Image (cartoon, rainbow, N blue to C red):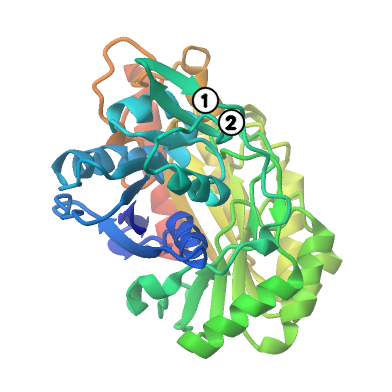
Amino acid sequence: MKIALLYPEVYDMARFSQERKEFPPFGVLYLAAVVEDAGHQVEIRRVAPGHTTLNLTGFDAVGFSLASSATYGLMLQARRESLIDSGALVMVGGVHANFYPAESLRDFAADVVADGESEDIILELLEHASDRDFTGVAGVLFERDGRTMRNPSRPLIRDIDTLPLPARHLLPREDIVLPDRLAGTDTRMAHVMFSRGCPFPCSFCAVGQRRMQYRGGTSARTELTHLIDAYGIEGFAIVDDNFIVNKSKVTDICKHISDLNLRWSALSRVDTVDQALLETMAASGCIEVKYGVESGSERLLKAMRKNTTRAKIRATIRMTARAGIQPKAFIIHGFPGENTETTRETISLLRELRPMLGRVSLFRFVPLPGTEVYNNALLHRIHGTHQQPGWDGDWTKFHIHHNERHWWGDADDWAETERSYAELRAFIEDEWGPQG
């Protein structure tokens, strides 16, 4: 069979004044690898603003990856404008589809929606491309006789090491190897995923999977060796939701890759590392850990369900610097309850940590669909969700970059949020510059 997998290409604004591509679409890259291994012909097609009318005739199946709610409208536009054979199987999956599968099924006029991991699901769907009988396929929704049928959930893949390496060869080389995305250096690098999921309940984070799945050290080494041989990389960034959770798994990967002489970075919480682990990471080439600090206000940290304190943040930043790794802080401003006092608490903490913090990225709060904040909008005084009266149908506004919308509270709350954000941003730019 001939299959087209579509993904949204978007640009981030982590650097305040510079457009940058996001990391590669790992969802469709893994699906493409699985489908290719099964003997099918696969093409990956990008959908971007101004590039939504695609000629998809000749494909037996077309899959739409709803990678985020912010790109939902873009992908829906592609569905409506693109040429697709009437007999082609139309499949939908991805993060937004996992949160809102019934709506995705309806809006995309799809034959079937995958809810959860799709590597196993897609092969079963292709087996039923002709008869459209999905009754025995776990983890999908489909229409039958005018009713939406929802099959039982599919268990998570027991061992993600069994998956083939993502099909990077189906994308242009410049989408895989980047020269300026590793810890502020000019290292030739690529992005990788060594785990899936995040078990922590942060109220602002849209994580669809709470159980952690880790790849082993041998698997990680195999992929990195391939990237060295095929693309000449000198480093890599781990883009997992929260790579540093299981210390033994992280240590195993570090020990398997330490002789590859690659520089690398990863994301972490401040409460999942210790000095020994950081030193092991440094010895294997880690040069930066990006921490979700979020705020210097303990009141807001509690409201965010971060389960941490200023003291813990201080200790972790110091440990990281002591290990020879550059710590970076992610800050979220404007969470419900933010005011001048909480903002200045964040400024005071950052000022204290300035000698050790290499970089800071500042984001404005957005109630991402699927999060606790979004799902409990009334409790958090959030407005503008699709569950409330007056919904305008615009999913693009839920974008974590370049977002300046009034999301919660009244006009006075918003005015104070605006003033305090300007104060925090000016401090960060004065100390660290307009960097990501």
Q: Which residue is denoted by mark 2 in the rendering?
A: 203
Q: Which residue is denoted by mark 1 in the rendering?
A: 373
Q: Please tell me whether mark 2 sits on a helix, a strand or a loop.
A: loop
Nearer the observer, 165 or 202: 165
217 is higher (above) or lower (below) than 45: below
Specify whether residue 365 is in view.
Answer: no
Who's the residue at 53% across and 45% down the image? Answer: 121
Q: Amino acid at mark 2?
A: Ser
Nearer the observer, 82 or 333: 82
Q: Quadrant of the C terminus?
A: bottom left
Q: Quadrant of the N terminus?
A: bottom left
Q: Please tell me whether mark 1 sits on a helix, a strand or a loop.
A: helix
Specify whether residue 394 is in view.
Answer: yes
Q: Is residue 278 left or right of residue 113?
A: right
State yes or no: discs 2 and 1 in contact (Cβ < 8 Å): yes
Q: Amino acid at mark 1?
A: Val
